[in-house]
Amino acid sequence: MTDTTKKQPTILETIYAQRAKDVEAAKSTAGTTPDDIAALLAMHLAPPLIPLVSRLKRNPSSNSASPSPSLMAEIKRASPSKGPIAMSTNAAAQALTYALSGASVISVLTEPTWFKGSLLDMRLARQAVDALPDRPAILRKEFILDEYQIAEARLHGADTVLLIVAMLPPERLTALYAYSLSLGMEPLVEVNNAREMELALALGAKVIGVNNRNLHDFQVDMGTTSRLVDMVKERDVILCALSGISSPKDVQVYKEQGVRAVLIGEALMRATDTSAFIRNLLQWPEPEPEKKQRTWVMVSGMKDAKQAKLLAEAGADLISLTFDSNSESNITLEEAAALSKEIRAQRSPSLSPATTPPLSPSPWLTAQKRNLQLTGVRPLLVGTFRSPTLPDILRTIAVAQLDLVQVDESVPDGWIPHIPVPVIRRFKIGNTAEVSRPGLHSFALVDLGVNGGNAVDLKKAAEVIQAGEAAKWPVPIILSGGLTTQNIREAFEVVAPWAVETSVEKGLAGDAHDFLAAVKGARQ
Ligand SMILES: O=C(O)c1ccccc1N[C@@H]1O[C@H](COP(=O)(O)O)[C@@H](O)[C@H]1O
């Protein structure tokens, strides 16, 4: 017979009990004991952090006169109240979509039983956004009851963790809050009523989320946040509304009340066009369309400073020197240093204040291209290397004062972070799988592998661009190999590269000048 006098545990109590068991199991598993996690943190194996508070203050509307709240976008496959929501979600792809749509925080549920999440999801979400210029913070959305889960979160790439006041005795809450801070992570402290808000404020929490969903009975009351707004007025606290938000009206009400961020799960997971849905929900401005930039030109094999100056005047943006003893264009270190000095003396950077466009979310190569264009200094000096050693590259950069270097496939990826200037990686047309890898080379040169005059396969190069960076941004490439005054117009039409390359073959400056003139004529 069932004992009807015994109170049924709420879902929060049930989840707590299960997570307490899960934590004990993880702690007693060889390789993931608390000592192991501490040793891994001491080895600095946790990736670098970004601060939650300042990241939450930035969103695509934050420069406007009336900024809308920031977005904490949640990856939520399922939930105890709704069951399955979006079971086939790929956490990394979803995270990248959120990031490129302007989210300030990506909230990743790591609870496996009711939410179908995992630490692997969180780690992949972090990896997917890691190379973005202003990546969102990663929140471990979890039922945290033990320091162990916070250390685990940090190790797997979280920038912040959730602490649920309703779930923790006050002294546990205080200890966990302090521990999270000790690892550099300002937590999101979740409350559901005035008493919990007082506890959160007493803690000194800087980011407080009011959950509109009562975690004991699942009831969602959108007024819960509104009723607590006054408690944080005039305080240095970012107030966030959590749960049940699905329409622009919901967000507008909170915005008017001074809520600075909203956490949204289900509505985002069900959206068909996530970016458009987010923009409409938050009333963020449309991203400014990329201004059509003129196609850049790189002239390679330069050995003569006067010639370089003339070509720069004729429109060359990048002047490349070849460091390859097997090439006729090879330049010695002494010659390179002299040429560099002359070019630097001649180039006159604009000293007027930089017109910096607002930071808009964009993937890695697109951002690198934009940043280079913003420098305003022309021509930039490139050192092109064939089978170099790392010390060769470093010394040449220092002596010849190179702005960029270009390397071929012989250079291991592991060297690139050690090269102190942006790297152009040369890819042969049949071998372009890694062109849009983020976070390593800053620019990709796609070599059609043909010498001037022969037929070039422009369609293949077009496919590389159209394969897309983060799916929908055209991959900015430098197109090289076989471009001539005759085919440059077609190359622009078929491929639309960011830049094109030609070379000063055997000192025939005329060719490069003709090429530059043809480029000018062909630019749309
Ligand atoms: O959604 C639930 O059933 C749930 C149950 C227990 C704890 C938390 C739960 N969900 C939380 O809901 C928000 C996101 O809400 P929404 O999907 O936008 O309505 C988030 O805080 C979840 O962790």
Image (tube, helix red, strand yellow):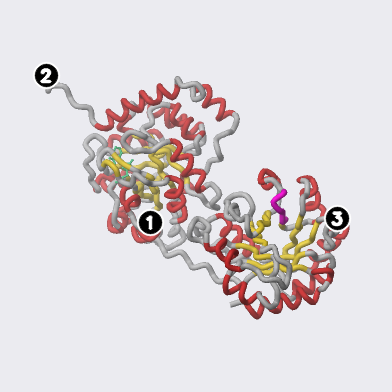
* Mark sitting earlier along the chain (1/2): 2
- The residue sitting at 80% across, 77% down in the picture is 510
Question: Relative to residue 167, is residue 303 drawn left or right?
Answer: right
Rendered position, 284 above or below 524:
above
Q: Which residue is mark 2?
A: 1
- The residue sitting at 42% across, 46% down in the picture is 90
Q: Position of residue 212 (x, y in %)?
A: 27, 44
Q: Position of residue 113 (x, y in %)?
A: 33, 33
What is the secondary structure assignment of the residue under circle 2? loop
What is the secondary structure assignment of the residue under circle 3? helix
Q: Are marks 1 and 2 in contact (CB under 8 Å)?
A: no
In the picture, the disc for residue 51 is none
Q: Which residue is mark 1?
A: 274
Q: Is residue 56 visible?
A: no
Q: Are marks 3 and 1 in contact (CB under 8 Å)?
A: no
Given residues 135 and 1, the one toward you in this image is 1
* Mark sitting earlier along the chain (3/2): 2
Quadrant in which the N terminus is drawn:
top left
The span shown in magenta is: 405-410
Given residues 71 and 253, the one toward you in this image is 71
Please, what is the three-letter code of the amino acid marked with disc 2? Met
Question: Relative to residue 79, is residue 37 drawn left or right?
Answer: right
- The residue sitting at 67% across, 43% down in the picture is 414
Please, what is the three-letter code of the amino acid marked with disc 3? Leu
Q: Are marks 3 and 2 in contact (CB under 8 Å)?
A: no
Quadrant in which the C terminus is drawn:
bottom right
Residue 98 included in the magenta stretch of the image: no
Q: Which residue is mark 3?
A: 333
Given residues 487 and 226, the one toward you in this image is 487
Please, what is the three-letter code of the amino acid marked with disc 1? Thr
Given residues 417 and 183, the one toward you in this image is 417
